[in-house]
Amino acid sequence: MARVWLDVPFAEKDEAKAQGARWDPAARRWFAPRQGMPGLERWAALPDIPALLPGEDRAFGSGLFVDLVPSSCWFTNVRSCVAPRDWERLRRMINGRAGQRCEACGRGEDRTARRWLEAHERWEYDEESAVQRLRRLVCLCTDCHTVTHFGLAEINGKRSAALAHLRSVTGMSATAAESHVRAAFALWRERSAREWTLDLSMLTGAGITVVPPPSAPERERAAWRTVRRERAAGAPAAPPVTARPAAPSPAVRETPSARTVSEEELARALDTVFGRPAPGGGPQWIAVPRWPWFCHMCDTHMRPPDIAVASVTETSQGQWRIVCRPCEWAHLVDDFALPGPVHRAVLASAAEALETPQSAATWDPGERRFRTVTGQLTDGRQERGKLP
C-alpha cells in the first residue's frame, strides 16, 4: 500500500510519531503507514505549494550578504504569519526546489556539524510607500542564515564565526567584510527610523492564509525572550564591546602588550566621532538613559548607565530637555572602525563626562573638552516598567 504523506510541523513531530507516523529520511517527510489511521487525520496532507510562488523572483537578492530587517518588522517573518502546517508546506517546497542545498554556499545539512537548512525571506523596500514586500524565499544553511542576521550573531557571541563565514563564501577581504557589515547596519538604522507595512501577497496568491503579525510590544517581548534563550544556550554572559559602552572608569586599562592612547590621539578620535551631525541636525549629544529599554541596534535591552544618543533642546533660559534615543551610542562609535585601544578610550572618556545625574554631553572641538548640560531627562515616551 502506498504511503500516506502528512504535513507535520516540527513542533508536533513527537506527537505525530506517538500516533503512528513514520519519517522518510529520503523524502524528508512524515507519512502514515496505512490509510485511515484515526490519530493522524489532523495532519492529512494539503496540496503541494507550487515551486514558484506568484510574483516571486528567484534571482532577487542572490548570494550571501548581511540582510537586516527593520525594527518595525521584527518577529513578523513569514513563519510567524502563517499556520504551522502551511509553514511546513513552504519549508518543504523551498528546500526541495533548492535540491536540499544552501542557495548561498551550496552545502547540505550536516547533523554532526549542527548545520541545518532554513528558510529566509528576501524583501523589497518601497521607500515612497513604506511597504516592505516579500519578493523571494530562499534556502540557507545555518551558517549562512547566521550571517544574514548579523545583529543576533553579535549578541550571542557568534560575530567572529559569522564574519569568517561571510569571507569564506564571498571571498571578501577582512576590510571589505567589516565595511559591508557597517554599511548594512547604516542602512538598517535608516530603515528602522520609520514604520513599514508588510506585503505578503506572494503567499496569499498561492492560497496560503496569512494571519495578522504580533503587536509591537509583543515583538519586543519575543525578541528579548530570544536573546535570553540564545544566552542560556551558551553565549557569553557579557555582550560584545560593539553592543554596549564600557562602564565608567578613571582610566583605560591595557594589557602589557597593548599600546596606550595619547591625549592627542583621543582628542582626534572624539573630534571624528562627534564631528558627524546628529540625525536631527546640530552636534552629537550623548546621555545616560533614565529607564531600561530595548535597543534597536543589537537586539538586547539597555540599562543605566548605558550611553544613548540624545537630543538636547533649551525650553527656557537655563532649562534643558534631554531626550534619549532608543539606540546605544556605542554602535555609532563602532561605525568609525577605530583601533581597539582608541575605541575603548573614546567610550570610557564619554562615560566619565556623564557622571552628573540628568546630564548630557557633547564634545567641544574648539576647546577640546566635553560640554555638559543638566535638565529634564526623558526618552520621549511614558516611563517604562520593569523588564519582562
Image: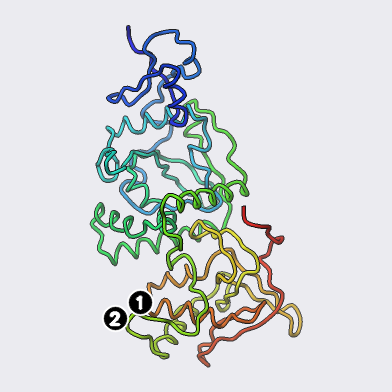
Residue count near mark 1 (Cα–Cα under 10 Å), binned few <14, some 14–19, many ≥20: few
The residue closer to the viewer here, 385 or 15, is 15
> Going 34% across and 44% down the picture, which residue do you hit?
142
**Residue to which mark 1 is pinned:** 339
Q: Could you say which quadrant of the image residue 122 lies in?
A: top left
The residue closer to the viewer here, 23 or 208, is 23
Q: Could you say which quadrant of the image residue 240 lies in?
A: bottom left
Question: What percent of the width, then of the height, locates residue 176?
Answer: 29, 64
**Amino acid type shown at disc 1:** Pro
Direction from residue 241 to residue 110 in the image, left or right = left
Question: What percent of the width, then of the height, locates residue 325?
Answer: 60, 66
Direction from residue 115 to residue 290 in the image, left or right = right
Local secondary structure at mark 1: loop
Q: Quick check: 3 above or below 59? A: above
Q: Quick check: 17 above or below 314? A: above
Residue count near mark 2 (Cα–Cα under 10 Å), binned few <14, some 14–19, many ≥20: few
Residue that protrudes farthest toward the right in the picture: 316
Direction from residue 104 to residue 318 in the image, left or right = right
Label 2 – label 1 distance at C-alpha: 14 Å
Q: Quick check: 303 above or below 162? A: below
Query: Count the marks: how many?
Result: 2
The numbered disc on residue 257 is 2
Question: What percent of the width, then of the height, locates residue 373?
Answer: 65, 83
**Amino acid type shown at disc 2:** Ser
> Going 31% across and 22% down the picture, which residue do you hit?
24
> Going 43% across and 18% down the picture, which residue do you hit?
45
